[in-house]
Amino acid sequence: MKNTQSIAEDKVASASSNSLLEVLPLEERERFYAKVDLVDLEVRTIFYDLNGTIDYIYFPVTCVGSILTVMADGSRIEASTVGNEGIIGLPVFLGQDCSPQLVVCQVPGQSLRMKVDVFKQLLKESPTMQMVLARYTQILYNLVSQSAACNRLHSIEKRCSRWLLMTHDRVGGDQFLLTHDYLASMLGVRRATVTVAAGILQKAGYIRYSRGIITILDRQGLESVTCECFHTIREDFNRLLGPARQ
């Protein structure tokens, strides 16, 4: 009979994996796998409400979470996204038990989930995870800074391409669910603006968009029209997380 860790690894192996867990040494990784549940998350599922208590830590596998800054009038703008390269619940590592932002599921899929008290105990026993999360915090800071510059300096077509490429890297497939309304909210523009940008990318043959489903047709073509920010962010993840096992 398989143990809990083996069952969890088998489930994840059929999709993809979470980079933060995969860089851990085998013994530490097994401790985390033994304490996670694999859950299916629908679009717009709320991980944490604004200022809400963090009860679970999530390690995305094929879903993508969106960290949203909420203004006094209720308007929202995306500060960052998190996929299988990261963790949802980073404030716990930084000493907070409540979420300073609204965090929702942006692209449906699977995630590994762990209770906060279990995560805190395992973290004490895992020096590598402590180091990895410190590196990840720096990466997330770089991502937010790069995104702020991107939103100010680059065209909507380039920004849209960057977002689609980052999502493509995370979901483990060429097709994912995404409405124009939601993408507009994430990019902080009007729906009509996103419709025009997506139309340009579709006309070029890079994507197909139909009834809320995005299909990546030409990854290389999409990379050729995106901005430098996509490559900068990806290189950060590769450089800072890659050597974590050494």
Image (cartoon, helix red, strand yellow):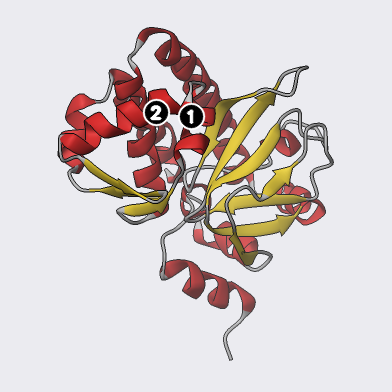
Any part of residue 172 in sight: yes
Judging from the image, what secondary structure is the residue with disc 2 in? helix
- Which of the 4 quarters of the picture holds residue 6? bottom right
Q: How far across and down, in percent of the image, does residue 221 sit?
A: 15, 35
Q: Which residue is mark 2?
A: 194
Lower position in the chain sequence, tag 1 or tag 2:
1
10 Å crowding of disc 2: few (<14), some (14-19), many (20+):
many
- Residue 112, placed above or below residue 165: below
- Residue 15, placed above or below residue 105: below
Q: What separation in Å lies between label 1 and label 2 (alpha carbons)? A: 6 Å
* Farthest-out residue, top: 153
- Residue 128, placed above or below residue 42: above
Classify residue 69 as left or right of residue 29. Answer: right
- Badge number at residue 76: none
10 Å crowding of disc 1: few (<14), some (14-19), many (20+):
some
Q: Quadrant of the C terminus?
A: top left
Residue at 70% x, 46% y is 46
Marks 1/2 in contact by CB < 8 Å: the verdict is yes
Q: How far across and down, in percent of the image, does residue 150 sit?
A: 40, 15
118 or 219, which lies in front?
219
Judging from the image, what secondary structure is the residue with disc 1 in? helix
Q: Of the residues shown, which amino acid type is indicated by label 2?
A: Val
Residue at 17% x, 44% y is 218
- Residue 220, placed above or below residue 212: above
Q: How far across and down, in percent of the image, does residue 147 sit?
A: 46, 19
Q: Which residue is mark 1?
A: 184
Q: Of the residues shown, which amino acid type is indicated by label 1?
A: Ala
